[in-house]
Image: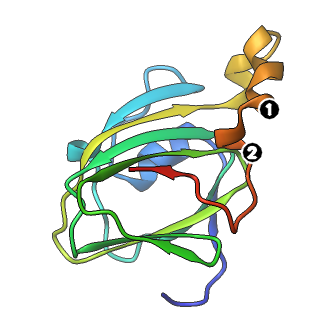
């Protein structure tokens, strides 16, 4: 993996554009099917998201590697992972690699003025150090 600056994705709409999707139906929340995502040549592999991401990914294999901080994660069957705003992760996929599963993207503003806005900070799966595991397999 090249040692480059991560690409900051500031909005869910920007993520849709990055992956070749039409704009989200709501700018603060989106559910994506990985079968519909494009991995465009030259698109950034290291990302910092400004929103929450919960993903259930299946059909991992030798063509896909995830990096979180300095850790590399390698799952064959699948995984579920949680990313809070401001955390860095990267994906390396072989050409033509297709992943299946679902991803929920939620902007913090969507939660504004709700009990979940305060409670989400207490959920340990969103609150971890980069040397700790965040994946469920």
Q: Position of residue 14 (x, y in %)?
A: 54, 46
Where disc 1 sits, the SS reads: helix
Q: Where is residue 122 in the image (x, y as percent from the top left)?
A: 79, 30
- Location of residue 31 by image quarter: top left
Name the foreground residue: 105 vs 25: 105
Q: Name the residue under label 1.
A: 121
Using the numbered discs, state the Cα–Cα distance from disc 1 to disc 2 in whole angstroms.
7 Å
- Location of residue 111 by image quarter: top right
Dots 1, 2 in contact, CB < 8 A: yes
Above or below — where is 136 with respect to 116?
Answer: below
The residue sitting at 43% across, 41% down in the picture is 55
- Location of residue 92 by image quarter: bottom left
Label 1 vs 2, first from the N-terminus? 1
Name the foreground residue: 83 vs 124: 124
The residue sitting at 38% across, 50% down in the picture is 137
Q: Check the image and name the residue furthest to the bottom.
A: 2
Above or below — where is 113 with respect to 100?
Answer: above
Left or right, 99 with respect to 109, comes to: left
Binning the other alpha carbons within 10 Å of mark 2 as few (below 14), some (14 to 19) or many (20 upward) gives some
Q: Mark 2 points at which residue?
A: 127
Where disc 2 sits, the SS reads: loop
Q: Where is residue 104 in the image (x, y as percent from the top left)?
A: 46, 32
Name the foreground residue: 77 vs 107: 77
Q: Check the image and name the residue furthest to the top.
A: 114
């Amino acid at each position: 993996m090249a040692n480059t600056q991560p690409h900051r994705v500031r909005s869910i709409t920007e993520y849709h554009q990055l992956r070749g999707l039409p704009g989200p139906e709501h700018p603060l929340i989106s559910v994506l099917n990985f079968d519909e995502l494009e991995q465009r040549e030259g698109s950034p592999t290291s990302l910092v998201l400004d929103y929450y991401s919960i993903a259930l990914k299946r059909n991992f294999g030798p063509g896909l590697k995830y990096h979180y901080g300095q850790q590399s994660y390698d799952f064959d069957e699948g995984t579920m992972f949680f990313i809070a705003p401001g955390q860095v992760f990267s994906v390396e996929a072989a050409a033509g690699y297709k992943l299946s599963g679902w991803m929920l993207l939620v902007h913090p503003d969507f939660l504004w003025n709700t009990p979940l806005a305060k409670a989400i900070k207490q959920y340990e799966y969103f609150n971890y150090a980069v040397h700790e595991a965040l994946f469920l397999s």
